[in-house]
Amino acid sequence: MAQKSSPSTTHFGFEDVPESEKQQRVDEVFRSVAARYDIMNDVMSAGLHRVWKDIFVTMAAPPRTLAYRHLDVAGGSGDIVLRLLAAGGPQVTSVLSDINGDMLAVGRERIDKAGLGARVEVCEANAEALPFGDRCFDLVTIAFGIRNVPRIDVALGEFYRVLRPGGRFLCLEFSTVDVPLLDKLYDLYSFNVIPRLGSLIAGDEAAYRYLVESIRRFPDAERFATMIGGAGFARVSARPLSGGIVAIHSGWRL
């Protein structure tokens, strides 16, 4: 008798779970913290996340005079979309996508408040199965979201598929600290302070413990760059920031 194949597993923080279970658990995390997500980002990073995102958008360099279509995956609260539209000209448009409706509601409110609703399409979408045609975007971005995707290789393939030839993929994600002493201080802060802040500010310590653990399980910059290249991207690069706390990854569809 043929043996039944065991279900594929992935990680949810330090826990191994079936791939089919991870997305639901991630959704629960972000549903819990959506309303306080931006405040927690400021507190956890002492405002550094704003600097990282500004550098990220500067690297994207949206045009000032040309039509340009941008997709932000796992864009939630709209931070990247708002920055990119401010940096580009009036013909730059964005699709803000996220699998979590609670996070998208925060982003939609911020975009409407900024008066940019006409230039942004809001779409509830799974990064592993994007509801867009082939070769229809000039830029695909994802910031602090790729490590929450159950099948990263599948998502990278989708990003490649929806980009036009000559289009660019940019990813801002936590990475591996490689500065002596800073790595120890970073671990101490991450595992002891961030979950407590999550409890005090967002009312969910477990969610922020997961987020810390998910960072440690994510591939380092070199390994992730190899994954990006494996999806078909060319001229792949990684730019570490703040001693490797985060890195900006870039790849082109040529």
Image (cartoon, rainbow, N blue to C red):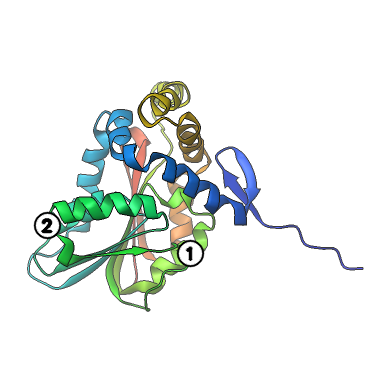
Asked whether residue 219 is in view, the answer is no
Q: Is the residue marked by circle 2 packed among few (<14), some (14-19), or many (20+) residues within 10 Å?
A: few
Per the model, the C-alpha gap separating discs 1 and 2 is 30 Å
Identify whether 17 is placed above or below 6: above
The residue that disc 2 covers is 115
Task: Pick the quarter of the image with the C terminus.
Answer: bottom left
Q: Residue at x 56, y 43 (%)?
A: 12
Q: Position of residue 38 (x, y in %)?
A: 29, 39
Q: Position of residue 114 (x, y in %)?
A: 13, 53
Task: Pick the quarter of the image with the N terminus.
Answer: bottom right
Quadrant position of residue 115: bottom left
Question: Quick one: 41 or 157, which is closer to the camera?
Answer: 41
Numbered marks: total? 2
The residue that disc 1 covers is 128
Q: Position of residue 107 (x, y in %)?
A: 27, 52
- Name the secondary structure under disc 1: loop
Q: Amino acid at mark 2?
A: Gly
